[in-house]
Image (cartoon, helix red, strand yellow):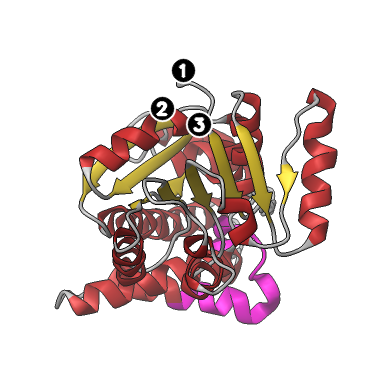
Amino acid sequence: MTSPQSIAFIGLGVMGGPMTGHLARAGHTVAAYNRSKERADKWRETWSEEGLEVAFAETPAEAAAKADIVFICVGNDEDLGEVALSDTGVLATMKSGALLVDHTTVSADMARRLASEAQARGIAAVDAPVSGGEAGAVNGQLAVMCGGTEKAVERARPVMDCYAKAIVHVGPSGAGQTAKMANQMCIAGVLGGLSEAIRLAAAAGLDLEKTYEAISGGAAQSWQMDNRWKTMMQDEFDFGFAIDWMRKDLGYALDEAKRLGLSSPVSALVDQFYAEVQAAGGGRRDTSALITRLPKGRPE
């Protein structure tokens, strides 16, 4: 375990809240900022039973002023720009020699811009989007894909260990975000196929639990199948990572593919399907709610 450090964490949402808790539990001195007071209050309620405390700041800049490492986990490019690059953002007060680790899923261009702005101030930056969802954050089992220099990633690694099961340095600034785009494309494609498979089995009158048992041990097996087959059967779609966020992430992925001159027809099609679920009011349901756009059909 790394020695205790002075840390700032910006963003106490579904992912950032538990990550902040793990950092405090690991013995680090943590200053936090969240745009809504309600989230800060919720953090206190959730973690107070352990006696954990953080200092809550009025601005990102205030939280970051004395930090050795600043972590950010917000919503999108615009949110990141606000908390990092504005007059009240973290770069306005971070000391030279500090480290900035961004866990937000944003565009690769934004990640490179942030790294450039940080470097100009003598600050190292790592783009470090995560995968694993709310359960991964709560259980400290996130997968972190990192872009930046090897030195910066290795400096962040022992601190991130308290909420990560895997930390992989995939390349220079922006590479972490590009890896996350690939991750989301894979998830979207798998959920598209999984939705159709469940509907097919149900319409044919198969026992869905037996069908899962029959196919989950072979080449069709996936995390989504193991964790979402039964909940999709039962029309349960409240597992943290919303369709609204998946569409945001797929938008970044499709834009990056276009910039690279690539065609991504499967991801584009599933994104359209998600748009249909959004239009029907399902944007806050988790990504497995993709199945709801498909009629159930009639058992034979």
Q: Who is closer to the viewer here, 32 or 236?
A: 32
| Residues marked 3 and 2 touching at CB (< 8 Å) | no
| Residue drawn at 35 percent across, 55 percent down | 180
Inspect the image, locate mark 2, and give the three-letter code of the amino acid beneath it.
Answer: Pro
What residue is pinned by disc 3? Answer: 141
First in sequence: mark 3 or mark 2?
A: 3
Q: Is residue 227 above or below residue 240?
A: above
Label 2: few (<14), some or many (≥20) within 10 Å? some
Q: Who is closer to the viewer here, 56 or 101?
A: 56
In the image, which residues are magenta? Answer: 272-291
Left or right for 151, reference 89:
left
Q: Is residue 284 above or below residue 180?
A: below
Residue 294 visible, this orientation: no
Left or right for 82, reference 192:
right
What residue is pinned by disc 1? Answer: 1
| Secondary structure found at label 3 | loop
Mark linked to residue 158: 2
Q: Is residue 38 magenta?
A: no
| Residues marked 2 and 1 touching at CB (< 8 Å) | yes
| Secondary structure found at label 2 | helix
Inspect the image, locate mark 1, and give the three-letter code of the amino acid beneath it.
Answer: Met
Q: Who is closer to the viewer here, 178 or 12?
A: 12
| Residue drawn at 35 percent across, 75 percent down | 268
Q: Is residue 281 magenta?
A: yes
Residue 19 visible, this orientation: yes
Inspect the image, locate mark 3, and give the three-letter code of the amino acid beneath it.
Answer: Gln
Residue 75 is drawn in which quadrant? bottom right
First in sequence: mark 1 or mark 3?
A: 1
* Image spot of residue 126 (x, y percent): 34, 50
